Image (spheres, coloured by chain):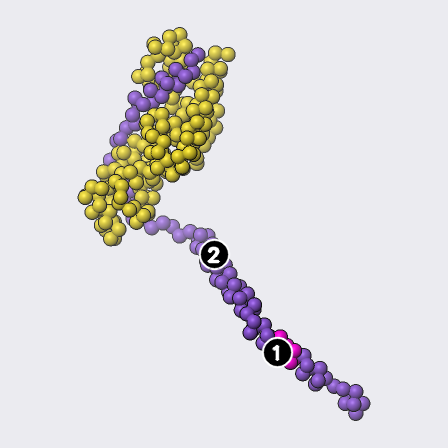
Chain colours: A yellow, B purple
Amino acid sequence: MEQADAELIAAVLGGNTASFEPLVAKYSPRVFATARRYARRESEVEDIVQEVWAKAFQKLSSFRGDAPFEHWLMRMAVRTCYDFLREHQRNRETTFTELSAPESDWLDRFVAAPESASEEASAAKQLIERVLAMLSPPARLVITLLEIEDRSVKEIAELTGWSVPLVKVRAFRARAEMKKCLQRIAQEKYL
Amino acid sequence: MNLAELQRKLIAAARKNLPAEEMPYAFEKRVMARLAAKPPTDEWAAWARSLWYGAGVCAVIALCMSVWSFTPDSEQDFASIFSQDLEQTIVDSPGDEDMAE
């Protein structure tokens, strides 16, 4: 662990709360990036990040220092994001009519010639956001960590607190769930 | 529609769409202000905590009483005291001669 981080943490645990601020300033960008994977509104993103820091401050005495502080903080961030997904489960049923014109056009191009549908297009990004929002919280978390962020099963187990077998089971179910969502979009558009 | 290819393309799109790391101006000040603010007292939680403490104390007392009631000396003393009291009561009860007088 970085010497500066260790000294700051020791100072906070010694009663100097102000020493927590440099940690917040240093690691907040990373936490914001993580939160933005799971929440769309900036107000929700800020709430998540504040919650992460409140928990980190409360549980700082449990930080053992055998791994970098950032790893410990990211574990807390991922779990807080998962709690957010569970608390904000809303109707994930998305009908075809809710797809925007650019998304629909992108799908049409994909059907006509898959290579012509660019991954860089903003419509593609909007479409994957929509599909992710349709997934259940565990499925969304696993797909994001495993497929999008390309993390290993072991890393995901450490981040989430799930066992390795549970991560594998959830990954299997998540892929099946995502396939069903895409099937539904395809059926509603073309049938 | 090739769903596997569609999924691959959409995942690739998500991978390229890295989330921004920017944070609001003076965000760390807001976090520190929140940490400095004392949380409001949760009266229900305090009441529930005291109930749990009471339940724990009662359980300990009940356990001690159970152990004490099953110890041989105490059982014998209780039985002997009760039998002595009963005998004394019967002996002291008014007989026929006393009632006839």
Labels 2 and 1 in the same subunit: yes
At x 55%, y 65%, the residue is B66
Q: Is residue A161 left or right of residue A30?
A: right
* Magenta stretch encompasses residue B80: yes
Indicate the quadrant containing the N terminus of chain A: top left, top right, bottom left or bottom right: top left
User: CA–CA distance between discs 2 and 1?
Assistant: 38 Å
Give the SS element for disc 1.
Answer: helix
Question: Which residues lie in the magenta part?
Answer: B79-85
- The location of residue A120, given as percent across then percent down, is 30, 17
Name the amino acid type tagged 2.
Trp
Residue A78 in sight here: no
| In the depicted structure, whether residue A62 falls above or below residue A153 | below
Q: Please name the residue that numbered disc 1 is placed on.
A: B81
- The location of residue A70, given as percent across then percent down, is 27, 38
**Residue B29 placement: quadrant:** top left
Name the amino acid type tagged 1.
Ile
- The location of residue B74, given as percent across then percent down, is 56, 73
Q: Please name the residue that numbered disc 2 is placed on.
A: B52
**Residue A150 placement: quadrant:** top left
Mark 2 Cα-neighbour bin, 10 Å: few <14, some 14–19, many ≥20: few
